[in-house]
Image (cartoon, grey):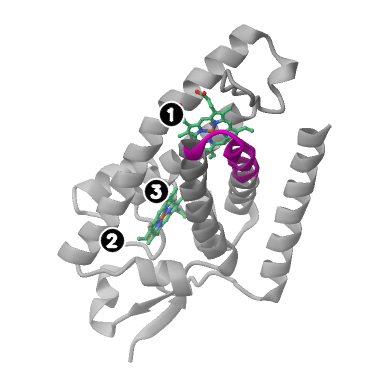
Amino acid sequence: MKKIIRVWDLPIRLFHWLLVVCIVLSFITVKIGGNAMDFHARIGYCVLSLIIFRICWGLIGSHHARFIHFVPSPKGLLNYLSGKAKAGLGHNPLGALSVLGLLFSVGLQAVTGLFANDDIAFKGPFAKYVSSGTVEFLTSIHRQNEKILIALIVIHLCAIFYYQKFKGENLIKPMLLGDKEIDPSEEAKYLPADLGQASKDGGLQRGLALLLLSLIAITLGYFITR
Ligand code: HEM
Ligand code: HEM
């Protein structure tokens, strides 16, 4: 019988799919331009709240959500690349680097957006606090980082496709439903400690995550509308 282990708690899954929807909408709204820039900014605030939430959840969240359980040491990364290390249930060491890159690039995009100016009618809410030189600099980072973000997303999608096609591992289902199903014949592939390590995903964790995200959004909203 297959072993079913909860890997991605509901807060992580909602974080991921909401992030995907918001990023797609932010690209659509910026291409429309004009009045849609207002939506572009609002979606950007949602993205920023999600990223701050994810950083906090990486410190206090469930087992596989925590940075300490998936960010690799240089030795761990080398062992993984040379095929010596056993697989973990959460992000693998290479995947972890891609996750960190995505979180950083998305976060940078949202933060620089707060100061950006489109030279027509729209200005980020924090542009008024800094010099015009700084606004110009942060706007140019907002523009340049677009390409980096797109590249990271393409690599992310290629990696998921690669795992599906060449390693026979469906990563999307656990990101949708939360669980990984481990066949007894495959157990030897995994770290024994990891096989006993499910992510807690009960009402208490979910309530805490909702409270945390609400507090982050309210605090951000306060500073943005001040
Ligand atoms: C805007 C595009 C996307 C962004 C910015 C993005 C970002 C991320 C991030 C930050 C994570 C880490 C989750 C965490 O630990 O918090 C992740 C994981 C993941 N994403 Fe995405 N994602 C995007 C699109 C997609 C799409 C379209 C799919 C499905 C086809 C997908 C499937 C996955 C899967 C399966 C994982 C888990 C990978 C693993 O098992 O290590 N992502 N993504
Ligand atoms: C993660 C969230 C965000 C993404 C993915 C994103 C993406 C983009 C992209 C792709 C562009 C077009 C850049 C170009 O001209 O080539 C852009 C422009 C812009 N964004 Fe964002 N953005 C985000 C958040 C924000 C936020 C929070 C604000 C403001 C509150 C903002 C304000 C602007 C402005 C003013 C421009 C026009 C800059 C210019 O004319 O070059 N963005 N954004």
Count neighbours of disc 3 (C-alpha within 10 A) and say few if under 14, some if 14 to 19, many if 20 or more: some
Count neighbours of disc 1 (C-alpha within 10 A) and say few if under 14, some if 14 to 19, many if 20 or more: some
In the image, which is nearer the foreground, mark 1 or mark 3? 1
Query: x, y (%) of residue 26?
Result: 52, 43
- Quarter of the render that holds ligand 1: bottom left
Q: What element carries label 3?
A: helix
Q: Name the residue under label 2.
A: 86
- Mark 3 or mark 2: whose residue is earlier in sequence: 2
- Mark 2 or mark 1: whose residue is earlier in sequence: 2
Work out whether 20 lies above or below 138: below
Please tell me whether residue 38 belongs to the stretch shown in magenta: yes
Q: What element carries label 1?
A: helix
Query: x, y (%) of residue 109?
Result: 52, 33
What amino acid is at disc 2?
Lys
Distance of label 3 from label 2 (alpha carbons):
15 Å
Residue in the image at 54% along x and 37% along y: 107
* Residue in front for this viewpoint, 193 or 104: 104
Q: Is mark 2 on a helix, strand or loop?
A: loop
Count neighbours of disc 2 (C-alpha within 10 A) and say few if under 14, some if 14 to 19, many if 20 or more: some
Q: Mark 1 points at which residue?
A: 145
Direction front: furthest residue: 34
Work out whether 107 lies above or below 124: below
Work out whether 54 lies above or below 168: above
Distance of label 2 from label 1 (alpha carbons):
34 Å
Residue in the image at 80% along x and 35% along y: 225
* Residue in front for this viewpoint, 208 or 3: 208
Marks 3/2 in contact by CB < 8 Å: the verdict is no
